[in-house]
Amino acid sequence: MKVLVLDDNYQDLAPMFRHCFREDEFVFVATPAAAEKVLGQNTFDVLLLDGNLGNGVTGPDVLRRWKSKGLGLPPVHMISGDPEMNKEGLEAGAAGAIDKIDIGEGFEALRKK
C-alpha cells in the first residue's frame, strides 16, 4: 500500500510506521501545501491526515478546502488523539478515523481492507 501521511510532527510517527509496516510505502509531509504538491505527482492508496496541523490549521479544515477545490484525493483517514477532531474530520468527508493512541492497530485494520 502507498500511503501519504500529512502530520506536522510526522518525525514522531515515521520510525514506527516504517518498522511496523515494512511492506508499505510511506511519504511523509508536514504541510497541506507539500501534500498538494505530492498528490499532484503521485497516486496513493490512502491519505492519513492529522487533526491538528499547528498554527490554528486543522485537518478537517484542510479536507473541506481540498474537497471544495475538487482536488483528487485517495480515501482520507483522520489520525488524531482528539475524538472530537476525528469526528469533525468524518463530518468533513474523511472515510475513517484512527485514534493516535491506537494508530498501530487502526492502520493494520485499514491495510487489510
Image: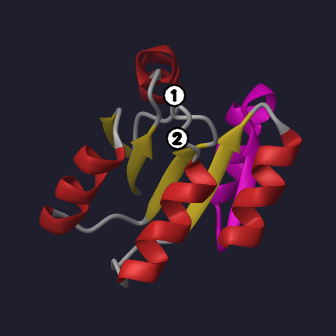
Disc marking residue 54: 1
Residue 15 painted magenta: no
Seen from this angle, which residue lies furthest front? Answer: 56
Disc marking residue 78: none
Crowding at dot 1, Cα within 10 Å, few <14 / some 14-19 / many 20+, comes out as some
Measure the C-alpha gap from mark 2 to mark 1: 6 Å
User: What residue range appears in magenta?
Assistant: 93-113
Q: Is residue 111 visible?
A: no
41 on left or right of 99: left
Pick the quarter of the image with the N terminus: bottom left
Please provide percent x and percent y for residue 69. Answer: 36, 80
Q: Is residue 13 visible?
A: yes
**Residue at the spot 47% in from the left edge and 21% down from the top edge:** 9
Q: Which residue is mark 2?
A: 57
The front one of 18 and 97 is 97
Seen from this angle, which residue lies furthest right? Answer: 83
Is residue 24 placed above or below 22 in the rendered structure?
below
**Residue at the spot 54% in from the left edge and 48% down from the top edge:** 49
Callout 1, which amino acid? Gly
Total labels drawn? 2
Q: Do callouts 2 and 1 mark residues in contact (Cβ within 8 Å)?
A: yes
Please provide percent x and percent y for residue 74. Answer: 43, 72
Quadrant of residue 60 in the image? bottom right
Q: Does dot 2 land on a helix, a strand or a loop?
A: loop
**Residue at the spot 35% in from the left edge and 32% down from the top edge:** 30
